[in-house]
Amino acid sequence: MKLYEPRNLAFLNAAVITVSYILLFVLSVTVIFSDAFTHYYTFLALLVSAMVIFLVAYFNFRYTLEKFIYDKIRLIYKSIHSVKVGKKGKAQIRPDGNLIDKVQAEVENWEKEKELEIEQLKRLEVYRREFIGNVSHELKTPLFNIQGYVSTLLDGGLEDPTINREYLKRTEKSIERLVKIIGDLDEISQLESGQLRLNIIRFDLVALTREVVEFLEMKAQKHEIYILLIDPEKPVMVEGDKDRIRQVLTNIIDNSIRYGNPDGGKTKISFFDLDEHILTEITDNGIGIDPGDLLRVFERFYRTERGRVATRKGKGLGLAIVKHIIEAHMQTVNVRSTIGVGTTFGFTLKKA
C-alpha cells in the first residue's frame, strides 16, 4: 500500500483515530461502569460510533488532501507537462493514478532536459562568440587591404604609373575575396533554411570526379601533390545535384592539396559500393588533424591550429558547405585523421 495516495493516507489516519477512540471508549466505560460490557447495547454503541468516526475522519482527511494539497500538485504536474509537450498537449491525470510518482518523474526528467539545454546553450554561446570573431577577422583582412590600397592611390599613387594599376588589381582581388565570403555565407544560410532547391539527376560520379581532378591538376602540380583516381573502369551512377556534388568534390580535393604533404604529397580518391549507396573517400598523406579538432572541422570559419600554421589561405567555409550539401541530399559525410599520417574525408550518395 502506497501511503502517499490520498485514499490510503486518509484510511490510515481514520484508522488511527478510530482505534484511539475505541481504546478511550473501552477505558472510560470500564472505569465508570464496570459491568457495562456485559450488555449487548454497549458493544452496539461502540461499533456504530466507531464506524461513524471512521467514515467522518476518512472522508474529511481525503477531501482535505485532495482539495488543498493534491490539487496544487496536479497544477504543478499540468504546468510542467504543458511546458514540456507544448500548448497542444494536455496532461491526462486519472483520479486513481500515482500522482506523486508522476510529478517526481516529470520533475526529474525536466531537470535532466534543462541541464542538457543549458549545456547546449553554453556550447552555442561559445560557438557564437567564435563565429562572430572569425567573421570579423575574415572580413577585416580584405577590408583593411582595400582601405590601404585606396588611401595610397588617393595620396598620389593614382598618378604614379608604376603602382596605380598594380594597386587597383590588388584592390580587385580583395573585393573578390569579400564577395566570395559573402556568397559562401549566403549559400550556407540557404542550405540550412532549405531555401536552396537541389536539381536531382542521374549522373556518373567517376566522370564528374575526373573533371574536378583535371580542373585542379595545375594547382596540384604547383603544390607537388600527386592525385590518384582509383578508376573502377565503369560508370558509377548516382542520384544528386551534379553541380553541388562537383562543389563538394572540389572543396575536399582542394583541401587535400592545400594541406597535403609538401614532400611527396598524394591524394587518393576511391569509390566503394555499399549496396544502396556509393561511398566516396578522398585520402591524403598530409599533416593530419588533431582529435580535438575532428568534431569541429565542418563548422563555419573553423580552422585547426595546424591548418593556420600550414597555410593562411582559405576561409574555413569549404567544409561547412560540403556538410550542408551532403546533408541536403539526406546523406552523410565523415572524417578520420591521424597526425603526421593523413586525413580521409568520405561521403555517401544514393545509387541510381
Image: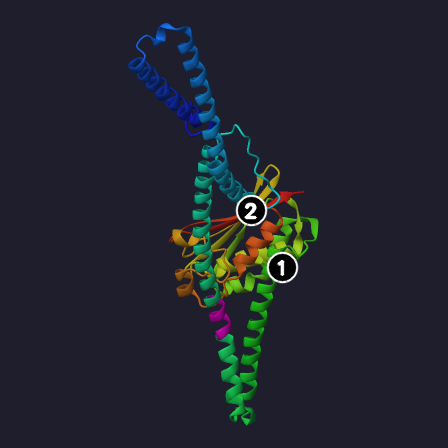
Name the residue rendered at 32%, 17% in the picture.
28
Region in magenta:
134-140
Which amino acid lies under the numbered mark 2 shown in the image of this protein? Answer: Thr
Which label sits on residue 332? 2
In this rendering, which labeled residue sits more in front, label 1 or label 2? Answer: 1
Residue 44 part of the magenta-drawn span: no
Q: In this view of the protein, which residue sits in the foreground, 62 or 208?
A: 62
Q: In this view of the protein, which residue sits in the foreground, 71 or 215?
A: 71
User: On the image, which quarter does residue 107 sit in?
Assistant: top left
Q: Within 10 Å of the Cα at label 2, are there few (<14), some (14-19), or many (20+) other Cα atoms?
A: some
Mark 2 lies on a secondary structure that is loop
Which label sits on residue 190? 1
Q: In this view of the protein, which residue sits in the foreground, 48 or 167?
A: 48
User: On the image, which quarter does residue 18 sit in?
Assistant: top left
Taking the view exactly as shown, the residue that stands out farthest to the front is: 32
Residue 137 part of the magenta-drawn span: yes
Quarter placement of the C terminus: top right
